[in-house]
Image (spheres, rainbow, N blue to C red):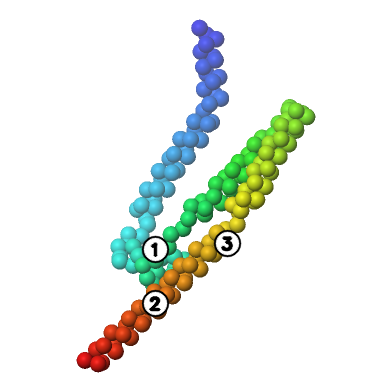
Amino acid sequence: MDESLSDQISQIDQIWPIAAYFIILAAMLVFMLLLSHFLGPKTRSRAKNTPYESGIISVNDNKTRFGNHFFLYAIFFVIFDLETIYLFAWVIAFDEVGWAGFIEASIFILILLAALVYLWRIGALELMHRHQPFRLKTIERQQLSAQQESSEHKNNQQVTVKR
C-alpha cells in the first residue's frame, strides 16, 4: 500500500511541469484575448468592411475563378515538408538504428524523389503553362465584349441622330 502511494507521488512529480505549462499557457491565452477585446479599437464604418487586396480597393466586381491546381503547391509543400520530420527523427536516432536505418531512410528518399520526378514529368509543377491559355482567352473575350458594346453604343447614337 505504501509503495503504490509513493509510485503515485513520483508520477505526479514527473507530470506536474507539463500540467503547469499547459495551465499557464491557457491562462496567457485567455488573458491576451481579453486584453485585445477590451483595449482594441471598436470602430464601425462602411470602409472597414470593404474588401481590398494589398491596400487597393477593388474597382469593379471582380469574380476571378482560380483552378484547384493552386492548391497542389500547398499539398506538395506539405508532403515534401513532412519528409524532413521523418528524416530529422532518423538523424536523432542514427546511433540506435545503424545501417538498417540508413538503408530505410535512403529508400524513403528515393521514393520521394521518384514522386517528385513523376510530378515534374506530368507537368504538375508548371503553373504558368496552365494559366496562360486561360488568362489569354479571358482577356480576348473581355476585349471582344468591349468592342461589341462600343459598336452597339455607336449604332444607338446614330439611330437617335437620324430620328
Residue at image point 40% right, 43% down:
30
Percent position of residue 140, x then y: 47, 72
Label 3, label 2: how far apart the Cα atoms are: 26 Å
Residue highlighted by disc 2:
146
Against 60, residue 78 (above or below) is: above
Say which of 141 and 50 sits in front. Answer: 141
Q: Are marks 1 and 2 in contact (CB under 8 Å)?
A: no
Q: Are marks 1 and 3 in contact (CB under 8 Å)?
A: no
Say which of 92 and 118 sits in front. Answer: 118
Q: Residues within 10 Å of mark 3 (few under 14, many from 20)?
A: few
Residue highlighted by disc 3:
128
Tag in front: 3 or 2:
2
Would residue 137 appear left or right of 109 to someone viewing this image?
Answer: left
Label 1, label 3: how far apart the Cα atoms are: 20 Å
Q: Which element is circle 2 on?
A: helix
Percent position of residue 17, x then y: 53, 31
- Look at label 2 and name its amino acid: Ala
Give the position of the C terminus as an image quadrant.
bottom left
State which quadrant residue 55 falls in: bottom left
Residue at image point 37% right, 48% down:
34
Label 1, label 2: how far apart the Cα atoms are: 17 Å
- Look at label 3 and name its amino acid: Met
Q: Residues within 10 Å of mark 1 (few under 14, many from 20)?
A: few
Say which of 140 and 8 sits in front. Answer: 140
Residue highlighted by disc 1:
63
Would residue 6 appear left or right of 92 to someone viewing this image?
Answer: left
Q: Are marks 3 and 2 in contact (CB under 8 Å)?
A: no
Percent position of residue 78, x then y: 57, 45
Q: Earlier in the sequence, mark 1 or mark 3?
A: 1
State which quadrant residue 159 falls in: bottom left
Q: Earlier in the sequence, mark 3 or mark 2?
A: 3
Q: Earlier in the sequence, mark 1 or mark 2?
A: 1
